[in-house]
Image: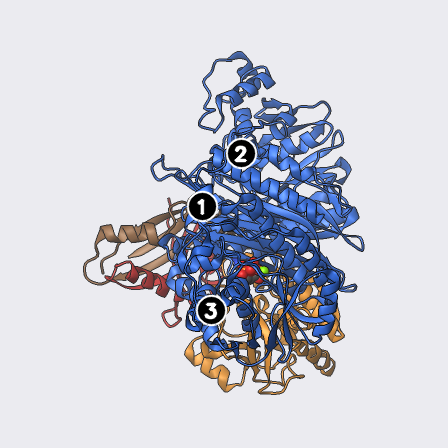
Chain colours: A orange, B blue, C red, D brown
Amino acid sequence: MRIGVLTFPGSLDDVDAARAVRLAGGEPVALWHADHDLKDVDAVILPGGFSYGDYLRAGAIAARAPLMQDVVARANDGMPVLGICNGFQVLCEAGLLPGALTRNSHLHFRNRDQVLTVERSDTAWTGDYATGQRIVIPVKNGEGRYVAADADLDRLEGEGRVVFRYTDGNPNGSSRDIAGVTSENGRVVGLMPHPEHAVEDLTGPSTDGLGFFTSVLKAAVAA
Amino acid sequence: MIDTVELAAKSPDDEQPWAELGLKSDEYDRIKSILGRRPTTAELAMYSVMWSEHCSYKSSKVHLRQFGDLPHSDALLVGIGENAGVVDVGDGYAVTFKVESHNHPSYVEPYQGAATGVGGIVRDILTMGARPIAVMDSLRFGRADAPDTARVLPGVVAGVGGYGNCLGLPNIGGELLFDDCYAGNPLVNALCVGVMRHEDVRLAKAEGLGNKVILFGARTGGDGIGGVSVLASETFDEHGPAKRPSVQVGDPFTEKLLIEACLEIFAADLVTGIQDLGGAGLSCATSELASAGTGGMHVDLDTVPLRDSTLTPAEILMSESQERMCAIVEPAKVDAFLAVCRKWDVLATVIGEVTDGDRLTVDWHGERIVDVPPRTVAHEGPVYERPMTRPADLDALQADDAARLPRPSTGAELQAHWLAVVSSPDGADKTWVTEQYDRYVRGNTVLAQPEDAGVVRIDEQSHRGIALALDGNARYARLDPYAGAQLNLAEAYRNVAVSGAKPLAVTNCLNFGSPEEPEVMWQFAEAVRGLADGCRELGLPVTGGNVSLYNQTGDVPINPTPVIGVLGVHEDVRRRIPGGWRADGETVLLLGETRAEFGGSAWASVVHGHLGGKPPVVDLAAERRLGELLAGLPGLVSSAHDLADGGLAQTLAESALRYGVGARLHLDGDLFTALFSESAARAVVTTGDSDAVRTAAAAAGVPVTELGTTGGDTLTVDGLLELGITELRAAWSATLPALFGAPEIAVGSVPAGTVPTS
Amino acid sequence: MVVDVVLKPEISDPQGQAVLGALGRLGHGSIASVRQGKHFVLEVDGTPDEAELKQIGETLLANPVIEDVELHLSTD
Amino acid sequence: MVVDVVLKPEISDPQGQAVLGALGRLGHGSIASVRQGKHFVLEVDGTPDEAELKQIGETLLANPVIEDVELHLSTD
Ligand SMILES: Nc1ncnc2c1ncn2[C@@H]1O[C@H](COP(=O)(O)OP(=O)(O)O)[C@@H](O)[C@H]1O
Ligand SMILES: [Mg+2]
């Protein structure tokens, strides 16, 4: 199973995402923002970091990179795409996911181990979790406050598109404790916390993040 | 009208602003005698920045030689003198690390000063051929409740985080301490560590006739001009002329691209020499490269890409615009070099070449404006043996023994003092600061704050890794700079050792007042001597460091603040020892000997506002025994935490609070001494097999005291006091958020242009 | 061209609120509200194409999901 | 009152540079330069005291070491 990890100028957690794919038993494939080449991957991860320094708005410039056109096209055909942190911001800016991520309410970058509740276990990236399961993975961002107009939030909730909620404390002031959302078809998922930093006991607060990368191996087969 | 070499030769008597540029009259005379004429304006600019204290180490050089004279160490691959020293950590891996100050710029513009401090030290590490893998920061501010601390601290922390986070470097530890003496002069010391294979070490020299000089990275602008000579060597004096030096603005995104481009360039073997541009910008890079090489160098200044077309040639040579590097490249490899830069959107320009002969020449608009022997600029600057005197107040200070201060006697008083120490700004939870730093990125962080040392895995297959700690107690150094430097060395050594690592090498950042004050110079000389002697005794090389002088407000210097970094190696990071208690029912053991030592202690400072007496006794042989014992303990102990500021009281609190596991303890002898003494060479460990630990300790010659057993939700000292973990945590964790946590304090701490926050 | 980008009124603005809080603390009680946005100054070569500038302002410089945009074309 | 805070011209503006780069890649080659700053909208109760507003703009909203401030008082 080939899982692409897209590197933009300023991507940082691409090595971590690739490691997580490897530990889950997949084959990470490095993708370069400026190419129009998805290298026959079965799914794509947009990793965390500061693409283009997060200048202008986090994710705004990366969302307009050449390879993103290919990602958007394939995603619309059902290819699984995961956006982590900066990758989530890119997906929102690219219009693949609803809403936007803005400056944290306390105005600081914040890195902590965060409890999340999995609200949906039927997306391409969450099949190995149970609905209602609590997981602990790191969160680290300065612009992670998820916002959208109230009506849009109501609609998202109604459609069951909230995949993760912050639990035991909201680290950035996100509306309705939303930590991650999905596309209508459940194939594209974005979240601010970092599952790729919770895949080894030695280096993470838990191994709760591994489930993202094992889930997609099955989902991509099923597709 | 450009001042050319030709013109300078014809107009020997033209007035030049050497004094404004910080040169002394004899220094100016020396430049004239080196050149056999007056310098051109551009040459004067180069000499003045390169001969500033910051670049030339003119006051400190004679003392720092002691580090170079330390006995040979097999671990040392590259010693002092290059951008950073390089150490062999086994399996063919080499590690380079260094700590550097950015104190004065951080006072003027906290966010950018701190950010560019991180940027600068990262480039030093990159220059050695290494991939930077982690950063640390050691910070000092005035009193925590002083208004100016509220102005400076949030910006500094946001700047350290903003830059390091955006580069993708985990922050694995540091220090945050407060003292009145830093009120007008905060300290921002940043450390970076990088890793490479032995064969990948790169040096800063220009070799090979005809090789090209390539400037790459950001464009050159008018920022930071004169920063070196003005910013770094002048005092901030309210009554002096207002200096509004231009500040450098950092662009971590460009630096990230520079890192990736450089690593690709190194991997393809495209450079013969490389140097970063830091203080003194192009003046420094070109003269150092040329000076270290065998030939000369010629630069055509018109080719330098500018951000501001009105810059004069002298300004271009002095500009400290950030995120720039300079490489020496064989002509046949230039195209490949430029192609890598294009891939990473890094601007790269050939600006000159290596020449035969031994001159550094620079042309501007077709005219020669610089023609100098590069060694005289870079390496043969003035050297001073400044006068020194032992501070007049030192005897009285040492005689004012902290042992005579009123002590707590009842359980209630002990408890109150305990809480006061751990909830003081120095003792309190640093989470409010450290959670602004990414500690996870790159996925190799094994231990980070609040552990004693940061531990990073460097090989995912073999699990080899490194440990690092930074320590700089300035109270001890004020009371006795020789012993203080050794105590800081000992603490950093101990912090690395408690993680289970074998200490290997030392870096340091020496923050002192004005070298022109004989009493400060004495403090400096004593600290260097103490550090050198300490390293000799511990068998550790000093691989590099940094000196920051003129840290004073008016004529009041800061307490001498030698910040010492120790690097250790872990053969297998899976065997690292964390600092906190995790399980119930383990035996708590104190390793080492406790004496009644309160001089410079946190207790005296927090409870009595007192600084006096002598610092704790230095016993490096005992430190070494403790370190060797700890290195053999993984597997036997489940936690280890060193004792330092705040003594056992602080260590017990931190160990319990880490995972919320308490303990029942009984302390023999004088309880006050047991809790608050700061005797060195001690650590607390927990174990399920205390007999085995005792046997190992006996063999190592380390005294062991059984303190009690972990478990429960209180820290209980039999018959005397009982501190609830909840109550303790509330006191410990409330301090910094109460002082700095309100969002409105952050207003203005992050400037307009450069706000990477995600 | 000058482009000012501000958060839509229904999106909360913690930066503006922090400034307001700081002003209150400093005794500037007469300030009733603060909103913080972004300010761009673009220089255009040749004659600016208004439609193009509008598109730049509305689609790149601002995120229409959360932000409003004001364009000020000036020719000098 | 509107306050625009921009970096002094001699200070580098990495954000503006990044936006300029993006515009170039998106085919907006006619944009010659971009500078990015902050934009504050303050509402004042009663009649604004100009000196006070100026002080606010210049000391709290901007760092005069690296930033310039433009005040636009509007009374509506
Ligand atoms: N400015 C800082 N940056 C990063 N880590 C910090 C900073 N200040 C404190 N820390 C971390 O907080 C922990 C506690 O600090 P401290 O009590 O000073 O440690 P120690 O007594 O071991 O020197 C350490 O892990 C240290 O690395
Ligand atoms: Mg320690």
Mark 3 Cα within 10 Å, few/some/many (few <14, many 20+)?
many
Residue bearing the label numbered 1: B397
Q: Position of residue B493 (x, y in %)?
A: 65, 54
Foreground: disc 1 or disc 2: 1
Q: Quadrant of the N terminus of chain A?
A: bottom right
**Image check: B97 left or right of A104?**
right
Q: Position of residue B109 (x, y in %)?
A: 44, 48
Residue B211's image quarter?
top right
Residue bearing the label numbered 2: B53
Q: Position of residue B695 (x, y in %)?
A: 74, 68
For ligand 1, tell me if the residue under mark 3 lies within 8 Å: no
Mark 2 Cα within 10 Å, few/some/many (few <14, many 20+)?
many
**Label 1 residue SS:** helix
Kind of residue at badge 1: Leu
**Image check: B342 left or right of B438?**
right
Residue bearing the label numbered 3: B733
Question: Which residue is at the front of the view, B408 or B121?
Answer: B408
From this view, report whether residue C58 is shown above or below residue D17. below
**Label 3 residue SS:** helix
Kind of residue at badge 3: Ser
From this view, report whether residue C41 is shown above or below residue B365. below
Q: Do the residues at discs 1 and 2 belong to one chain?
A: yes
